[in-house]
Image (tube, grey):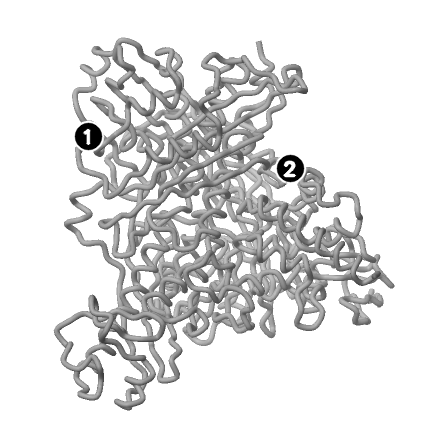
Amino acid sequence: MPHSITLTVNGRAHEVHLDDPRVTLLDLLRERLALAGTKKGCDRGQCGACTVLVNGRRANSCLMLAATLDGCEITTIEGLSEGGDLHPVQTAFIENDAFQCGYCTPGQIMSAVGLIAEGRAGDDPERIREGMSGNLCRCAAYHGITLAVQEATRRMAKDEMEDAA
Amino acid sequence: MSDTLARPMRFGSNSGQPLTRRDGIAKVTGAATFAGDNSPEGLLHAVFVPATIARGHVTYLDVESAERHPGVTCVLTPQNRPPLQGDPSAKPTMFSFRIEVLQDDTVRYAGQPIALVVGETLEAATEGARLLSPRYEVEPVRTSLDDNEAFGFEPAGFGLPAGAEHGDVEAGHAASAKSVDVTYETAAQYHNAMETHAVVASWDGDRLTLDMPSQALMMSCAGYANFFGIPPENVTLSSPYLGGGFGSKAFVTGPQVLAILAARMAGRPVKLMLTRQQMFGPVGHRGATRQRLRLGIDENAELTVIDHEGLAETSTFDDFVEPAANASQGLYAARALRSTHRAVRLDIGTPGPMRAPGEASGSAALECAIDELAELAGIDPLECRLRNYAETEPGTGRPYSSKALRECYSQGAARFGWADRPLEPRQVRDENGLLTGWGMGTAFFPAPMFAAEATATLRPDGTALVETSAADMGQGAWTALAQIAADSLGLPMDKLEFRAGHSSLPDGGIAGGSGHTATAGGALHAAGTDVVQQLGQIAAADPASPLHGAGNGRFVARESRIYLEGDDTRSEAFADIMARTGSAEITGSGSASRPPEDAERHAMSSHGAVFAEVKVDPELGQMRVTRLVGAFAAGRIINPRLAESQLMGGMIWGISFALHEEAKFDHRSGRIVNADFAGYHVPVNADVQGLEVITVHEDDPFVNALGIKGVGEIGVTGTVGAIGNAIRHATGRRIRRFPIRVEDLLAG
């Protein structure tokens, strides 16, 4: 039973014809919308590699059925940088060597963007570590991830203040 | 994304600095394409069905229901699996494992592939696999080290470790004033790279194209070609990025062979990505061990003997024996030394090398046992290690090519504040009443080199192309190897085009054994040097060049100029030489090597010292590593930023080994009960705090031309023992089983 939904992915509206109700948001992105930047690490919400923003909140895309997301706004790693400019979190990840193999990195970065937007961790390393603990990194680049989120948080706060001024 | 890094690199153009990763932008934007990210036209999806018993036979598969499911295109079982040219039971090379590719209905371990379902969509194939509803004839299983007879073996290279015996071991035991006889156990661990094993396979006649993560591209090509009766050069393997490997992605695996076979049958590309649960079986693991250590010391706390017996699990059908006791062979200056190994056959997938194979498990036990001795002697654990410092290699007496372990001890101890450690255990509580303990361990890992080749081509426009099929699984090969290549050609990084991760390139060897930077880097260095010598000779033959007549000398390059070695007054720019002589491209080639006489005369290893602080809740037994300082001497460090990340990653693997990781078997069914990331614990971000790495300077003129050892695995060693020792110091409890569990501290 085909089912049509409308999704806005990275600012672009998609009319998605779902021929299969079993398709998860993660598999929709990877296998049907050619957005393979979002990674599959466990397919059951245990590792965070598939983290995207759904209506601005971070979510494990492997745990969401695409058919339930009609009208939602999705942001993936591919939609994070504007034009050629990296998002401050992306820049901070590079500068703090917050990844090795890079496989969990899209999920880590989306999770960090979500965490910063939630505004509950600030630049406190202990809260950042807690808030980022839904995203596994087997290379264990955690030291750099924490530093990167701290740095991006400060930079974004500063940019915001300057914009306000 | 192609093999080269097509995106403009806005980071990492300062050669000689701790550069950021050259593949950094690709990795933070989602542009880095891992194998399973590829979706060629006409793609089919494959899902394999894992056995849910550990021993017996498959008696029934509901193939009809699976085939009837809409979208399922093929169900592959032992009944209809076409023949393979290669024998799955054979071991064509030393680095081959016997694999399970539906050769019969026998089940040898839980998780073994018993069928493969192919479908138009992943959803259809997944449901088809579920519908097969296998039935079995079940036989009793053996999954614990006590479930079968231990056997000895003749050491036979890769899968079967050697033993060693030096000095008079019995006399060593007899001469000891104090001794320990202790048994340590380590759990089975599964690599669990974040990227599961994957392949996208497509055929064009008898030519095979594979997108597949590989730590050893050429070896993989030969391995897969063998099964399909085609020459290795007919296989094109692309592996620009690996989502982690840790030893598990160097070998041919059964599921991947089946997916390639399915692609040949369908005449269409096939994608297979293992599920997380499927990573616990057919793709290797670190075998569980039980190690008995009998150590003796004299009145001065000097070791009279190290007697280390390792017992490890292997499968019923192949051999890989965790070489744990090897860890005792090269570290402390015992008067007598013996390490032996035995194995037990169990109904499990065949173990394999996993980050610091042998060294990690062996070091965990040895470093704790050394502390047990120090306690008997009533001396500080660091003092005990210094009294047994090996100035030359124990047993052989060979000098070390370099060994700055003493500096590691002193710098690490100073940074940690070790001097303030109370000798007795259970002396310190923090402001919240948590028991606080400090422990240490020595880190140790050999510095091997393998075979690799590379080419370098200098172009008239002053840029160069360097090529080798090296693999970057996160260690930073894209960056560190490019730095080596740029240095060898005397070029800044932005003049260098670096190609790797593809089988069409010169053989970059294996990314393993912590030897890839030394090996592939050695080949690149040799190739660049070859180009420089050729260009120097062209200049020397040209009367118009300041280098004219210098053809008997050697040439060096820096800042895009050729210099006569030892005479900085004679030099000329690459561009000038090439323009004037009308040179087209100049191509050089090189291979990695270590002079055999240097290898024979020296012991070659990296060393380090790790200091740990743990805090333990006295009521709940909850343990936290609150500080971890590692000081490592690993030869020349090409990129301090990346080396530090590698060392930290290794140390966190040490936390994981000590406190988290364990595949928990149900010994009645033979299945792993925690085969996913909810139950199989690895450290999360909140488990890691207070981590510091010091790299200690070390010049090594013998290890290779570049003085490089390796940093990939050593961080796991030393750390596990340091944490075990810190828990002893905090609580007064000596736990001889890893991982250490809350219940171990609460019991009795």
Point out residue B353 in the picture as x, y percentages from the top left corner.
40, 43
The answer to whether residue B101 shows anywhere in this view is no
Could you tell me which secondary element the residue under label 1 belongs to? loop
Q: Tell me the crowding category of disc 2: few under 14, some 14 to 19, or many 20 or more residues within 10 angstroms, Cα based.
A: some
Q: Which mark is residue B395?
A: 1
- The residue identified by callout 2 is B686
Q: Amino acid at mark 2?
A: Ala
Quarter occupied by the C terminus of chain B: top right
Query: Residue B119 occupies which quadrant of the picture?
Result: bottom right
Q: Tag 2, which chain?
A: B
Give me the residue at 48% from left, 59% from top. B19
Rendered view: B577 above or below B71 = below
Q: Amino acid at mark 1?
A: Gly
Rendered view: B682 above or below B244 = above
Q: Tag 1, which chain?
A: B
Give me the residue at 35% from left, 84% from top. B460
Rendered view: A39 above or below A81 = above
Q: Are marks 2 and 1 in contact (CB under 8 Å)?
A: no
Q: Which mark is residue A38?
A: none
- Name the side, left or right, on which B608 lies relative to B572: right
Point out residue A36 in the picture as x, y percentages from the top left corner.
64, 64
Give me the residue at 22% from left, 54% from top. B594
Point out residue B670 in the picture as x, y percentages from the top left corner.
53, 32
Distance from label 2 to label 1 (Cα)? 43 Å
